[in-house]
Amino acid sequence: MAIFEGSGVALVTPMNEDGTVNFDQLKELTEWHVSEGTDAIIACGTTGEASTLIDEEHLAVIETVIKQVNGRIPVIAGTGSNDTKHGIYLAVEAEKLGADALLIVTPYYNKATKKSLIAHYEAICSQVKTPVILYSVASRTNLNLTPSLVKALKEIPNVQGIKEASSDISQIVEIARLVDDNFALYSGNDDQVVPVLSVGGSGVISTIANITPKDTSAMVHHYLNGELEQAKKIQLKQMPLIDVIFSEVNPVPVKKGVELLKGIEAHYRLPLGPPEDETVERLRKEMHAYGLI
């Protein structure tokens, strides 16, 4: 059984000009996503700039989202780390806060071997009962979850799905072949949602859903309801906007998109900074063409 079906937004983390987290705006965005039909919220993922949050902030963001959602949709907490002990700490604390699932990225920089990578996930999962979604994004971590690794990791009892962001559709198809209906396959790339659904995917963990929550959810549900043409139309409609929001490193453009849409000023923490003027103009143009602004 999938933790959710549809669109899970990888939520941006609103910040003040001084770089502190703006918790009032975080609550506002969370409530907006619930009202717009987002199917799940991922707090402290890549798009949420989790890697620049200290532990107290990281857990406070997760707690704020959980309390604001108040059980209406699943909240998935990003708790990955390249330090297994640290990953255990974040997972245990997120479970205490009431997260519905944990999104655990492969350890970055250390370049774990297959055997030690399995041991890493086993160590974390042994300390929590909460469902775990693997997160494979080699472009950021330099560590790919191959189909054979996914097959091995899915045997860990609380590993119940994967956010697959390799962009390798052949790999995704092979993963789909090796898992069963109890293992959820989520697209980690906004430009591959319909292709992933076509091989049995349950939905998407999405960046573009920060600015197109209704359409992103509708696309998945159209497909799951057999309305394939409607799903395809939304996927194709989103492509020019997807191109812009990934023209610079995520979440730089999409956070600016949230500002243009919702009036929540886009502030970042170094090493991230504001997008180039050209990117902002392209973003404004495509959001206007899409009918967002």
Image: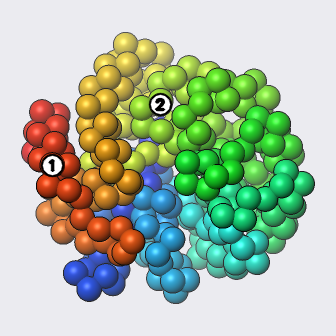
Instruction: State which quarter of the image contains the N terminus.
Output: top right
What residue does disc 1 label? 278
Is residue 23 in view from this perspective? no
Question: Which quadrant of the view contains residue 119?
Answer: bottom right
Residue 193 shows which numbered tag?
2
Q: If the image is split into quadrants, where does the C terminus sit?
A: top left
**Left or right: residue 15 compared with residue 66:** left
User: Judging from the image, what secondary structure is the residue with disc 2 in?
Assistant: helix
List x then y, in percent, for residue 251. Answer: 36, 57
Task: Tell me the residue at 25%/72% (across/down).
Answer: 267
Tell me which residue sits at (64%, 52%) in the image: 142
Q: Is residue 268 above or below residue 231?
A: below
* Mark 2 crowd level (few <14, some 14–19, many ≥20, 10 Å Cα): many
State left or right for residue 233 relative to residue 188: left
Q: Quadrant of residue 197?
A: top right
* Residue type, mark 1 in image: Glu
Kindly report which numbered mark, 2 or 1, lies closer to the viewer in this rendering: 1
Residue 249: x %, y % from top left: 38, 54
Q: Residue at x 68, y 68 (%)?
A: 82
Amino acid at the residue labelled 2: Val
The residue drawn where x is 82% and y is 47% is 153
Image-based side of 197 in relation to 112, left or right = left
Q: Whole-Å distance between the Cαs marked 2 and 1?
A: 27 Å
Name which quarter of the figure residue 165 lies in. Answer: top right
Instruction: Measuring from the top left, give residue 55's x and y in whole percent.
Output: 55, 83
Q: Tell me which label, 2 or 1, sits earlier in the chain.
A: 2
